[in-house]
Every structure is written in C-alpha cells, then in structure tokens.
Image (cartoon, rainbow, N blue to C red):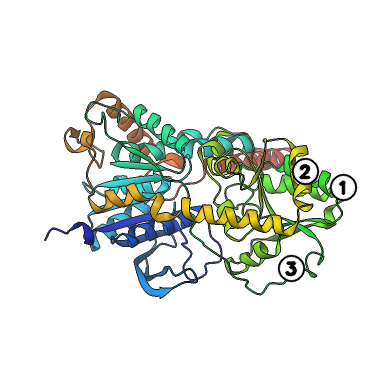
Amino acid sequence: MTRTESNRRALLCGVGPIPLGSPDRLHAPGLRLWAFSRALLEKGCSVDLLEARFGEAISGGGASALRMRLTEKRDADGQREIAADSVGLEPAAPSILVSRRLAAQSYDAVISTTDVMNEACAVSCGDLPLWCDFFGHPMTERQALADVYGSDEGIAPQWDMAIAALLRGDRFSGCSEAQRCALIGELGACGRLNRFTSGESLVTSVPAAAVFRRFSAGGTELRGKVVPEDAFVVLWTGGYNTWADPDTLAAALIRAMEREPRIHYLSTGGAIEGHDDRTFDRFRRRIDASPFADRCHFAGWVETRQVPDYYLQADMAVNCDRAVLEGELGTRTRIHEWICAGLPVISTNVCELARDLAGRGLIDTFEPGDSQSLADRILEAAGRRSEEIQSRTEKARRYLLEAYDPVRLCRELVDWAANPVRARDLSENGVRLPGIPFSLPNNGLARRRAAEWLAARKAGGPAAGRGGPRLNPLSWTRLTRRARRILGRLKAWPCSCPRAVR
C-alpha cells in the first residue's frame, strides 16, 4: 500500500543522546536529532530514531532504536511533549545497525546526521531517498584538531569518511549559509554538480534550533557555597573544544578581575576525552598560574539536570572562539541555551548565530584574540542595571524562540520527508560499479572519487571506512609517538641482552 504524505515514515539516524530521560550529558549532535524529530513529528511524519551514543558511534556500541511520538501532555509553554519507546541494540558497526533497522521496518526515507552516520546510511540504505545532514563542517573541524595536536594525519581519513555520503546523498544540509556553500563546493569536487542537477537545490542551510524554551532550577546551590553571594558570575558551559581560545579567555578574565573584585569565573564541562584534552589543560594552567585562581571555579562535567542551576545562578555567559574556519562554518548551540535561560551573552563574532544576534543588539561581541575588548565587555556587563539586563535578555529570548524554532528552520526537510525523491543524477543517470554499494553519478569525476573511497576502504587501519571500529588518527599518532619514546628509553637502559631490546 502506498503511503500518503501524512503518514510517511522516516528513519532518522544520528549520534545522541537526545534530551529524553535526563541523560548524564548532552552534546550538539543529540540536540540536532531532537530538533529534527520535533519538526518532523509536528508536521505529521512518523519517525523512528536510530541513536548511536556519543563516543561510541564509530564502534557501534551503545546504540538504541526509538519510536518517537508526540503526546497530549503539554509543557509549561503549551507545547506537546515528545515520548519514545526505546529498545537497546546489539553492538555492531554503524552500517550494520542501519541495515538491521531497514530490514526490520519499511521506511519511505532515511535522514542521517553526523559524518559517521552519513557514511553508514550511504552504504546501507539501498535506493531509499537519503538526506545527509552535516551539523558542522567536518573538514574545518579536522583542521582545527590538526592545529591543536600539530598533526595533519587525520585530514585524509576525514575526507574518506565524507566521500560516500557526498556521492550517495539525495539532499544535504548544514548549520549555516557558509557551510551550505562549502558543501556545494564539495559536491562539485565529487561530480555532483552535473547536467542532471543543474537547477536542483541539493543543499539547505538549517541553523541550530532553540530546542529548550525555558529552564527550571534543579536544587544545586552555588551562591554562598561555590561562589560568594554577591559575586558577579561569568559562566562557561560545555567542552573546551579545538575552536576555543584559552589564551584570550584567560587574559581577559585576569584583566577584568584586576579591576572588579566581584567577578568570579564558573565553568562546567572541560576536556573532551578522546578528542581534545589540550585546550582545557592549556586554559587551566594559565588560570592556576594567575593571582586569581581562587576566583575561578571548575565544576567539571555535571549531570544534565544540574546544568540549569548554573544558568540560573550566573550573571552572564561567555563564548570565546579562535579565528578558525570551523567557527565561520559551524555554530554554538550553547548560546541558545544561555539566552533561553535569561543570561546576557558575550561572544566572539565568528559564527553566523553570534553575528545575527549581535546585529540585532541582543548580545555583545568582540573580535577573536582581543582580550582587552572581552575584558571591557565583561566589566560593562558587571556595571549594568538589573532592569536593563532583564529587558534585553527577554527580547533576545523572544527573538530566538521565534526565529530559531525547529519547525520553522526545518521546513525544507519536512517538505522533502513528506514527498522524498531521489536526486536526478542518481535516479536518471546513476551507475553501479563493482565494490561500490550504491549508485553514483555516471561521470568521470564521480567515478574517480568513488575509486579513492574504495581504495581507502580496502586499505584498512584508521581510514578503513568499513563501518567497524576506527581509531582517531590523531590518537594513533600520539600512541605511535609514545611507543617510540618508550622504546627509546628502553634502548638507553643498561641491559645484559641489548639485542632483545632492539
């Protein structure tokens, strides 16, 4: 039986956890899944979710299948709440997880997010229409990571992971207009800009949505315990990722604290295990060596239910980016949460979200690397009257909830899911090649990229692309260097059997 537009069923694949059942931590990919789910459900599309856990997505561990639904129960803003029936899945490679879900249930379309799940869906979804969302630009993210660790070894494997989705996807989305243009360029490099797709809109900008409308206190007392009752609290929440500028942030805080004794810095989050443990350590060392270490408080990774207490008891929040392309093409979901919690925000003017809000006079911004400007902004915020702050933050919240509403932002995605279609260069001129598990455009450039992907897939190691466990290439580099150092020390030790050591 052919389904009507009102009862289309989509398989939504991505990396969680989603904010259902108070998970210990939330990450940007899980919030993306939540926004997509709400938009699709609100417009009548049935949604099943394949959620791989953050940190385990590559290995296929910790995955769940969820049948999403809107309930008649309403939240404080009158919105229907989302519920889900969840089933844990046996650990498997991401592509196998997708294949199993498609075998267990009939779907009209597949929607995937993140580079890992985009690749898995590309090799597993057969001829089903496929929408691939890159929430943040993978190549500039890897560039920032390479800069932090001083190694370019992860760049080729990152591209290898993206090729399958770029060749196979029918529609694409990114989180900014800049990323939309970058994706178009990458599609051109893969032979997707051809005579069949001329005039066809392959890429849509879907900014990060405001998925939380308000926050309630969870009972964690900070005033009078962690910080003084009369402190002016500058807040940071979340990971200190490769894009963060620890030197500028530390210098600005020290300058501001020199002039205003009420200022205290409060941080949740920290190093991102298995990804970036250097940026936070660099910042912490700068702070610990300063005269104001006792006015900087590091709570570490706190449970999700406790995070609102930090929002509601702070006086302002700060986001400090380096001047890297990742910020221009990506976004900062934490800014959404700070504004919805009623916090004034100071941010570098790098990402589109920050520039949009600053252009409307709703947040304060500063240039990347300008620690004096950031210190001045903090001091200005500390001197503002409470009624002035409240008026501005409420205006920012109202604008954000309207302009960045999930249903509004995901309109093109929802329309496509109601009537999912294949890209013309795949449906009318696609070709199957030996070893490639999907049709690709029938042109020389696409075949060349497919051959590169297949060679990387067969090569094994970190860039295998087989859907199984991958070791982060930068982790591989660190492991190799550590092994060399250990062997070097062993060679230097006195030993009666030197040949055995060598």
Residue that label 2 marks: 375
* Nearer-N-terminus badge (2/3): 3
- The location of residue 115, given as percent across then percent down, is 42, 45
Up/down of 193 relative to 391, above or below: above
* 108 to 173, vertically: above or below: below
Residue topped by disc 1? 259
Number of marks in picture: 3
Query: Which of the two discs, 1 and 3, sits closer to the camera?
Result: 1
Labelled disc at residue 78: none
Is 48 left, or right, of 183 in this rendering?
left
Image coordinates for residue 212, horizontal then vertical, percent? 51, 61
Q: Residue at x 24, y 41 (%)?
A: 438
Along the line of sight, which residue is nearer the eye, 76 or 290? Answer: 76
Indicate the quadrant containing the C terminus: top left, top right, bottom left or bottom right.
top right
**N-terminal-most mark, 1 or 3:** 3
Label 2 is placed on what type of residue?
Ala
Q: Residues within 10 Å of mark 3 (few under 14, many from 20)?
A: some
Looking at numbered disc 3 in the image, what kind of residue is underneath it? Answer: Leu
The reply to whether the C-beta atoms of the residues labelled 2 and 1 are less than 8 Å apart is yes
Q: Nearer the viewer, residue 215 or 356?
A: 356
For label 1, the crowd category at 10 Å Cα-Cα, with few meaning under 14, some 14 to 19 and many 20 or more, is few
Can residue 500 be seen from the camera position used here?
no
Residue 327 point in image, percent of width and height: 56, 39
Residues at marks 2 and 3 touching, judged by CB atoms closer than 8 Å: no
Q: Secondary structure at mark 1?
A: helix
User: What is the secondary structure assignment of the residue under circle 2?
Assistant: helix
Q: CA distance from mark 2 to mark 1?
A: 10 Å
- Check disc 3 and report the residue beneath it: 222
Q: Quadrant of the N terminus?
A: bottom left
Q: Residue at x 47, y 61 (%)?
A: 17
**Amino acid bearing label 1:** Arg
